[in-house]
Image (tube, rainbow, N blue to C red):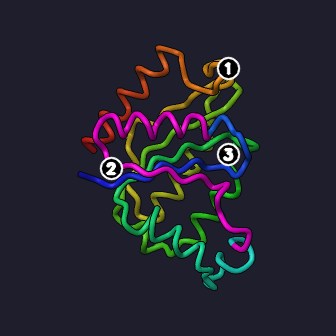
């Protein structure tokens, strides 16, 4: 069984991205997967000024040990920011030693309130992950108009979206 980390790839509080990430976490757990959820909102403030340049804080090292080092698969839930993904995700990727990512696998989910589901951001992220020698699962899921797919409690309720997420996860677990 693979260890999987779901990464909510924004540091925005109460984001739709984190709501989608929570659904992925629950869905993977219900399939018997060893899954963990990490939100970039939980990064230490030192990540930009010291952790990024190799002066590891104890907090950031614990994040690497818990959510990256011991994992073999990652699900990146990446919201659209200016036609790509959030800069905090790039900082996170850059702050983790590159060899830590090598030969792992990733599944990508784009999230946006617009109509493209962060397709450009997922392609940009694919290029970066491939550079880090991470194998990216072919079934990338753009979730468009995410704000209309959540109920008042912030749960995904759209039957078609739930079906394609299940299909994506079934394939990724076999990948």
Mark-to-mark CA distance, 1 and 3 = 28 Å
The residue that label 3 is drawn on is 84
Q: Earlier in the sequence, mark 2 or mark 1?
A: 2
Instruction: Residue at 67% x, 20% y: name it.
Output: 152
SS at badge 2: strand
Residues 124 and 158: in front is: 158
Q: Earlier in the sequence, mark 1 or mark 3?
A: 3
Residue 78, label in figure: none
The picture places residue 10, in percent across and down from the top left corner, at 67, 49
The picture places residue 116, in percent across and down from the top left corner, at 64, 28
**Most frequent secondary structure within the magenta stretch:** helix
Q: Is residue 138 above or below residue 73?
A: above
- Closer to viewer: mark 1 or mark 3: 1
| Residue at the extreme front of the image, as rendered | 153
| Residue at the extreme bottom of the image, as rendered | 55
The residue that label 2 is drawn on is 34
Instruction: Residue at 60% x, 35% y: name it.
Output: 19
Residue 22 sits inside the magenta stretch = yes
Q: Is residue 141 above or below residue 148?
A: below
| Residue at the extreme top of the image, as rendered | 159
Instruction: Residue at 73% x, 47% y: name it.
Output: 12
Q: Is residue 8 above or below residue 157?
A: below
Apparent side of residue 170 relative to residue 9 in the rendered image (left or right)? left
Residue 152, label in figure: 1
SS at badge 1: loop
Apparent side of residue 6 relative to residue 145 in the rendered image (left or right)? left
């Amino acid at each position: 069984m693979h260890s999987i980390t779901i990464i909510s790839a924004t540091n925005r509080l109460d984001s739709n991205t984190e709501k989608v990430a929570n659904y992925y976490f629950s869905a993977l757990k219900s399939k018997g997967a060893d899954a963990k959820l990490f939100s970039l909102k939980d990064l230490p403030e030192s990540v930009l000024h010291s952790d990024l340049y190799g002066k590891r804080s104890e907090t950031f090292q614990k994040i690497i040990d818990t959510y990256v080092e011991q994992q073999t698969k990652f699900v990146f839930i990446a919201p659209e920011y200016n036609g790509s993904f959030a800069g905090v995700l790039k900082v996170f990727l850059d702050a983790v030693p590159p060899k830590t990512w090598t030969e792992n696998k990733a599944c990508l989910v784009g999230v946006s309130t617009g109509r493209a589901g962060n397709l450009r951001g997922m392609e940009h992220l694919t290029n970066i992950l491939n550079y880090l020698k991470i194998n990216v699962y072919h079934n990338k899921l753009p979730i468009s108009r995410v704000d209309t797919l959540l109920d008042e409690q912030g749960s995904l309720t759209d039957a078609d979206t739930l079906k394609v997420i299940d299909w994506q996860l079934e394939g990724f677990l076999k990948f």
